Image: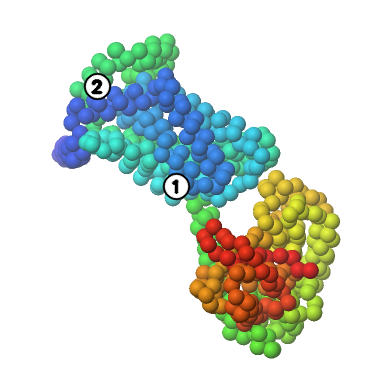
Amino acid sequence: MTKNTDTFRLFRIILRLWKNFRDRFADSLNVDEDRKAAIYIDLSKSATLRDITYWLQIFFSAGIATLGLVLNSPAVIIGAMLISPLMGPILSGGLALATGDLILAVRSFVNLLLSSFGAIIFAMILVAFLPFKEGNQEILSRTSPNTLDLGIALFSGAIGSLAVCKEVKGVVTSIPGVAIAVALMPPLCVVGYGMGLAVSLNFSDGWRFASGGGLLYLTNLVAITFMAMVVFILLRIDSPGVRKRVREWRATDSESIAWQNAIAKIPSLEQAREIRSMSLRLLMILLPLLLIFIPLTQSYYKLKNEIQVKQAENQIQQTAKAVWNEGFSKQENGEARILDEIRVATKDEKLEIYLRIFDNEPYTQEERNQFLTELSKRLDRREDSVALQLIEIPTSARDDLTVKAESTPVPLSISELQTQFLQRVQNALTGVSLPAPAKTLDFVINYSSGINNAGVIIFYASEREIDNDAKELLRGNIRQRLNLPNASISFERVSTEKRAFSFINNTAELSPEASQELAEAMEVLRAHPQLKAVFELNSKVNGTLLAERQKAVAAYFKEIGAIPENRLSFVKSDQQSNNGKTDFYRIALGE
């Protein structure tokens, strides 16, 4: 008997503390009975199906978000976030769960269901008719949600609910719209993008985008609704006085009357109106939250592993670069060998190091073996567990101008396959013509994912980018010639547009901006020996200064970049750019 009495007293103490906390929470937000009633009625009105402005906002924000995703434009996507109208029905859903209001729950559910399908279908139609449908960073970032996204959604739901409850005087309350729209409209449009891609181009990729975006959308929707429910429970928004005023409002609201009559015709729903169990309502929101948590946790650990692998690869890259700089970056004649790229991959417990270098004196077998030995020692690995993939791109000072791909000490069969693949790529590109005015320069092969998934980077010179449709046709043509449907084909443009640069006043000294500009041109010439730089110098300066400027440019390229003067061309010009500059240069194909 005494034990039961003590338990009862403890329960009363906990209940009293809970009530005191709820009262103080509401008081801190200045939410009195009148404000609670106003919140309840306003959120009930927001779950309407009859407001044409609401539906226009749904379609407009979905259209802006979809086009922003396709264009990979964060600014456009943010614009769609700011006008998203989904805040109302989501918060009203949380309010319905907090109060056990079946009529409001049905209205919110139907509104969200129709709004979601409307936005998805509209996005799908837009994407289906677009001529380009390549995935980009903004789309891909919303197809792999994890528990971090769940945390963001929980915070968004909390701040959105609090901002709605707290009465702000003289300020437009945009916080809820921002907090919720950030988390909902873009992933919803990714679902539409994936469905549009599935029906018009590629079903498997489309389904992957749609399912990933759908999971993120459901994650945010459920999490935000849950936090809204918690906030409204803390506010004790369903007090008897508030319920009375809500009933009075519903008695005069035509849409509420219509929903009440519809629910009355369904016996099971009519009986559910009497269920006031808080535990049942919590279960209704916690169950989907827990179900979603499972794939989110899997994605989180996958992301964690990827980050750990990336960190390990970065450490290996830094070690490889350090080994290179300490003893392998100089030729016998003292000139530098330029390390252009380092990539790392692990395959079948074997570490593969990819190096791309520019040089005019080929590496010997002994040098490659020494580099591999020193690198293995630094990494504390067996030498036979490290493979070196060396791509040499010769500069103009070398007699043999063929790109060479060396692989050591990988097994002979792999080396033979790589040599064969190099020849296949050369043969395939021989018969491929780029759309004018683009001209093919050279290519680089990435074997990090294996021969069957090798990547080919094609460099081309042009005044403008090749459009996406033409690139897709070229990729298909090259893959067909290679007989490798999974090969990654990418294009990198070397701009041949005319650019202005300047000298300091009436001297032959390059301005700091010009030095930086010409340094970029120098790197292009070093990477592509078949190119030259054409300089158009101001013909209005006196002959002596003109000759000095020509010598200064030639000396700059020779001393800094080891670019010989025969790859530089100088002509006179009387043009003037919009900003007043009178000297120009452009990259062109050599004779």
Mark number, residue 122 = none
Q: Position of residue 293 (x, y in %)?
A: 46, 44
Residue, x 80% and y 54% (percent of image)?
A: 433
Residue, x 54% and y 38% (percent of image)?
A: 66
- Using a 10 Å C-alpha cutoff, classify the residue at mark 1 as few (fewer than 14 neighbours), some (14 to 19) or many (20 or more): some
Q: Which residue type carries mark 1?
A: Asp
Q: Which is nearer the eye, 219 or 441?
A: 441
Q: Is residue 485 left or right of residue 18?
A: right
The image quadrant of residue 350 is: bottom right
Q: Is residue 184 above or below residue 404?
A: above
The image quadrant of residue 208 is: top right
Q: Which residue type carries mark 2?
A: Arg
Q: Position of residue 63 (x, y in %)?
A: 52, 34
Residue, x 66% and y 34% (percent of image)?
A: 199
Q: Is residue 299 left or right of residue 457?
A: left
Mark number, residue 243 = 2
Q: Position of residue 418 (x, y in %)?
A: 78, 66
Q: Is residue 554 above or below residue 280?
A: below
Q: Is residue 582 left or right of residue 249?
A: right
For the C terminus, give its image quadrant.
Answer: bottom right
Q: Is residue 259 visible?
A: yes
Residue indicated by mark 1: 149
